Image (cartoon, rainbow, N blue to C red):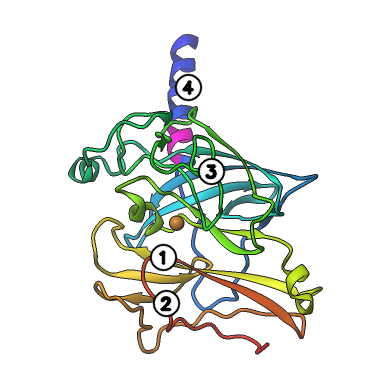
Amino acid sequence: MGSVLKCLVTIAICGFCLQNCLAQCPPRPAPNTVLNDAPSIYSQNGTLTAGLTLGYSVDVSGYTHYCYQYITPTGVAEAPTLRVNPGDQLLLSITDAIPSTATESKSAMHNMAAPAATCGDGGSATLQSTNVHFHGMSMPPTCHQDDVLNTLIQPGANNTFQYNTTIPATQPPGLYWYHPHVHGFTEFQVNGGAAGALVVEGMEKYRPEVTGLVERVFVLRQEYLVPWVPGPYQLTINFENAGVIEGPTPYIQMKPGAAIPEYDSHPPRGTRRIHRAGSHRTDQCRARGPAL
Ligand SMILES: [Cu+2]
């Protein structure tokens, strides 16, 4: 094989791998194991800088996953918790690595006659397009901030989009979340698991009794077999499957005998932030661990 041909084959293989390897979501935790928190990214000197890649994969059980991949020194983590203070700058770069062939036929089915986006890559909204909504935050709905109507990030390793916004100085401390919010397609990626916690620090200024408590963050997600088709879905806690739910229902109910995820809590006293990142009620979700 000539050197030029070898080089072209290598480039082709690397390109294929880059597109597809990046798009693979991390495996889910084994059932009935102790829950781990997502890694936290803290603001440094008033700025939080992070880069996330939205990936896609279908697991061995046929469940579609969309995942915010975050590269750490020890590997790829999913949906890190972003921790900011009021007044911080948030620099979040997003790359869309969803394979363009992953859900093409479904995209056409759901494509709505929405006006072309004017921020980001533009083009039409499809199941492969993405953007980010900072849920509950009082940021301006403008380009590069909390704009979900006119911002579209299209698939492509080179299409990194930069969010650059300021956490309002008056933002109350507490638990918020970030997730894709492409107009007309929001539920699809969220139902595939793409959601993460966003914590505004400073609760101890309002509730001094929480000072010094070790904190756990639990995010409840519904993960549909096929995110754009109502049907069976998993209820997950920090991505660990807590039961399969049959059929569309306004209430999530654990199946009898379903494994209950455990959490450990080393300190005798701690605080837990529990967030529901989905569109259904999860009031019957259970986890097993020490009482407060
Ligand atoms: Cu939202």
Please state, as top left, top right, bottom left or bottom right, where the C terminus lies in the image: bottom right
Q: Which residues are magenta?
A: 16-20
* Quadrant of res 253: bottom left
For discs 2 and 3, the disc positioned in front in the rendered view = 3
Q: Is mark 3 within 8 Å of ligand 1?
A: no
Q: Which residue is mark 4?
A: 11
* Quadrant of res 177: bottom right
Question: What residue do we see at 37% from left, 66% from top?
Answer: 279
Question: What residue do we see at 36% from left, 52% from top?
Answer: 186
Q: Which residue is mark 3?
A: 140
Residue 278 numbered tag: 1
Q: Of the residues shown, which amino acid type is indicated by label 1?
A: Gly
Question: Secondary structure under badge 4?
Answer: helix
Q: Which residue is mark 2?
A: 282
Residue 164, above or below 5: below
User: Residue most toward the front?
Assistant: 170
| Measured Cα–Cα span from mark 2 to mark 1 | 9 Å
Q: Viewer-proximal residue, 206 or 75?
A: 206
Residue 87 numbered tag: none
Image side of residue 128 versus residue 259, left or right = left
Q: Viewer-proximal residue, 83 or 189?
A: 83
Question: What residue do we see at 64% from left, 57% from top?
Answer: 171
Q: Of the residues shown, which amino acid type is indicated by label 4?
A: Ile
| Measured Cα–Cα span from mark 2 to mark 3 | 30 Å
How crowded pointer 2 is (Cα within 10 Å; few <14, some 14-19, many 20+) is rated as: many
Q: Of the residues shown, which amino acid type is indicated by label 2?
A: Thr
Q: Viewer-proximal residue, 53 or 5?
A: 53
- Residue 263 coordinates in the image, percent (x, y): 61, 79
